[in-house]
Image (spheres, coloured by chain):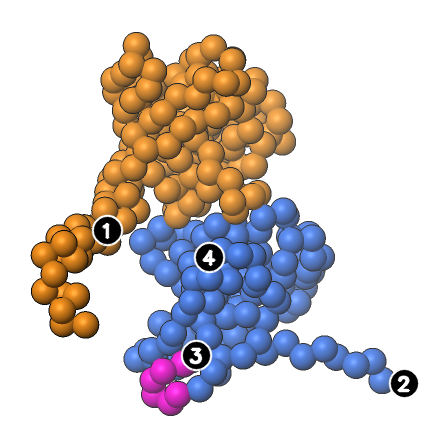
Amino acid sequence: MSKFFHNPKAQYILRKLGWVPVFAFFVDHVYSVASVNGRSMQPTFNPDSNKLRHDIVLLNRWAIAWRKYEIGDVVTLWSPFDPDLLITKRIIALEGDTVITLPPYPDKLVNVPKGYCWVEGDENFHSKDSNSFGPVPLGLINAKVTHIIWPLSRFGKVPIITRPGRVFYGVSNFSVVGNIV
Amino acid sequence: MGPSMLPTFNEIGDVVAQEHISPRLGLLEIGDVVVCVSPTTPGRSVCKRILGMPGDYICVDPTERNRRYLTVPRGHVWLQGDNMSNSTDSRSYGPVPYALIRGRVFAKLWPELRWIKNGMAPISEPK
């Protein structure tokens, strides 16, 4: 056995293998890449509906570990209805805000409770988002989508889009909202 | 940990062992003790017992005057603490998404060493 460890080739391999846990930690907790399918985030991701072409994006997990997400960020989160499905949506409102919802949702206005957020796809018609499943717990958010890597023609930062016309920021009182509407 | 699991775990100072495999594989059952990210405070974990799986029809709070019943939606579980009189659980924040579950508690290490078993026993109907 000691002969094996003194072999320079074995030492070289062992030294390289030492980087595997470092790499695993980096992918799990710092940055990783993923491909986006589906059209719920058009036109930000997959602008042409060709199902053979997927955008590849960079996921920032470090920011989520420190809970640095803001309204307008694109995030990946575990679907509340399917624990194995990772979905990509945009944060529209955080806790304490009031959102004007879109059709599938039963109520016209919804107050986002503490610890929850309201997520929507950029393409409302093809997106299954908070308008169908309601506010989602922030703990489901898995990573922040910061950059588009592929295709190279659209390489760059993911734009931050807010919906100021549909959200009353910091208003959690329905009667106040009712007067505005 | 807090008072919510009181007969099973003490208020503070208990050490438990959890495994992450059965939540990933979907092997959780009613009665399992799980550690889950709190839906109301994303930085905190809570320890509760699963009392309802997707599709189960449950009573939200039997002590209420007007009992409310609901069906646990797809991909969610119903969690409650063992100390029902002092526990913030699904009765206040509703069904919890399955993806928030981090692990299943299978053993208590401190102050005494013992397995945490699934506490649900089938009730046989009296004949």
Circle nearer the viewer, 3 or 1: 1
Q: Residues within 10 Å of mark 2 (few under 14, many from 20)?
A: few
Going 53% across and 37% down the picture, which residue do you hit?
A134
Residue A102 visible (yes or no): yes
The residue lying toward the viewer, choosing from A164 and A63, is A63
Farthest-out residue, right: B127
State yes or no: discs 2 and 4 in contact (Cβ < 8 Å): no
The x and y percentages for residue A27 are: 28, 43
**Which residue: 46% across, 57% down?**
B101
Q: Amino acid at mark 4?
A: Ile
Mark 3 residue type: Ala
Q: Earlier in the sequence, mark 3 or mark 4?
A: 4
Chain that bears disc 1: A
- Which of the two marks, 3 or 2, is nearer to us in this view? 3
Label 3 and label 4: CA atoms lie apart by: 17 Å
Dot in front, 1 or 4: 1
Dot label at residue B107: 3
Position in image of residue B110 (x %, y %): 34, 84
Give the number of the disc on residue B127: 2
- Name the chain letter of the residue that bears numbered label 3: B
What residue does disc 1 label?
A20
A33 is higher (above) or lower (below) than A17: above
The residue labelled by disc 4 is B101
**Looking at numbered disc 1 in the image, what kind of residue is underneath it?**
Val
Q: Chain coloured blue: which letter?
A: B
Residue A60 higher or lower than B22, as above or below: above
Identify the magenta region.
B108-113
Q: Residue at x 47, y 67 (%)?
A: B104
